[in-house]
Amino acid sequence: MSSSAVFFSPAEVIGDQLGAIKASAQDIGPIYLRQITAAILIMSSSHPYYQQKPSSNSSFIMGSIPTNSPMADSATKLELYILSDFHPEAVKYAQNSFDCIPYGDPRTENWHSHATAILIKDCYNTEDDLASAPQLRVIGKQGVGLDKIDAEACKRRNVKVCNTPGVNASAVTEMALCLALTVAREVPQMVIRQRIQGEAIRKETVAGMLLSRKTIGVALQTLPELLEVTDVVTLHVPLTHSTKNMIAAPQLKQMKKTAILINTARGGIVNEEDLADALEKGEIWGASFDCHCQEPPTLAKYERLWKCPRFVGTPHIAAATDETPIPTISVAIDGIFDVDLTRANKKIVAEAEANGTEVRLLSH
């Protein structure tokens, strides 16, 4: 079935991922992916933070320090509390614009009392955290997901949040393709059996499912329609009230028995117990998660799911490449700088107008 790809409630950053998927599929070669009929099904959300764009101030070469990092006068630098362990080059970049309180510094333990700006990777920022941080004005978050940040509390307290959507799209796209092929060709089973048997497995004993000419994206409008005809379903949505358990027993029963489900978005979008049931009953071919409800995932929590022969789990590493850390954190740092600069400019304008001074805004 030949078809064109569409987005389910599209967001701009997902368009970047679709383009990367198409490019990756073409680059892999002629054996299995050359004749795929469409791009991987993307289900996204119109959530505002998925429609933000990286800061225009940042110009970087992958894996290197950005070349035109914003600069601040040393006498007016804002203090930035770095609450996660970041790449040393990223910290150097932040020091161009901020008076940094580095990760591990004893002062970070009392950030609630002093911080106006914080930089985080995977920390929680709850209502209680925000309530105990009266001076906090901006949070820089490496990565897209905001599920560990109380967005409503930030809104009420006028705390700006700067995340980094789109910067790691290519890395996540590659991982989604990797996981789909891994499940389809039963790669883990082959590796395990070879290790146990101590010799190469005869090709006659290998099953696996060919993805060539499979339907991986279709021009349909509803989720049930998509699930009924799609062979590879890969999820790219934020975790919200509307997306929690978006894929559960009813949706899994709508899918083909040969379908593969990939989640590189957030744990909780797929009901994990229902998925284990579906895999054990053979209701779908297989599944792979880079994101789990409990992170980091543990054997005690996920033994049942991980024992399913066609389930592959990875510990939220889709964006973990040598090239992505510095660009993603640089965009977050630029966002904090922009917020600080905007506040400073507004203060200058307000003070000038209060003194009766004419204010002119000059274009660049």
Image (cartoon, grey):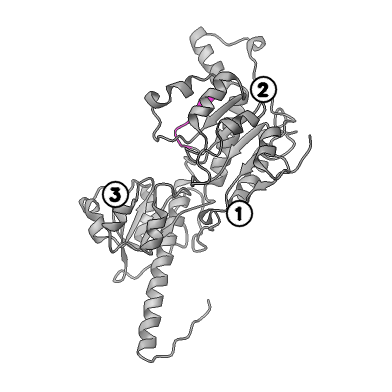
Above or below 32: residue 238: below
Image quadrant in which you'd find residue 300? top left
* Left or right, 128 with reference to 298: left
Q: Residues within 10 Å of mark 3 (few under 14, many from 20)?
A: some
- Tell me, for residue 209, which label it has, or none: 2
Count of numbered marks:
3
Residue at figure coordinates x 72%, y 29% from the top left: 212
Three-letter code, disc 2? Met
Three-letter code, disc 1? Glu
The range drawn in magenta is: 310-317
**Disc 3 and disc 1: Cα gap in Å?**
33 Å
Residue at figure coordinates x 40%, y 76% from the top left: 345
**Disc 2 and disc 3: Cα gap in Å?**
47 Å
Report the residue marked by disc 3.
Answer: 103
Q: Tell which circle, 2 or 1, labels the residue nearer the N-terminal end.
A: 1
Q: Between 189 and 102, which is closer to the camera in this rendering?
A: 189
Element assignment for label 2? loop
Element assignment for label 3? loop
Q: Overall secondary structure of the magenta stretch?
A: loop
- Tell me, for residue 12, which label it has, or none: 1
What quarter of the picture does the N terminus occupy? top right
**Residue 8 visible in the current orientation:** yes
Q: Tell which circle, 3 or 1, labels the residue nearer the N-terminal end.
A: 1
Was residue 313 drawn as part of the magenta stretch in this picture?
yes
Position in image of residue 275 (x %, y %): 53, 28
- Tell me, for residue 135, which label it has, or none: none
Please identify, in this view, whether the residue under mark 3 or under mark 1 is nearer the observer.
Answer: 1
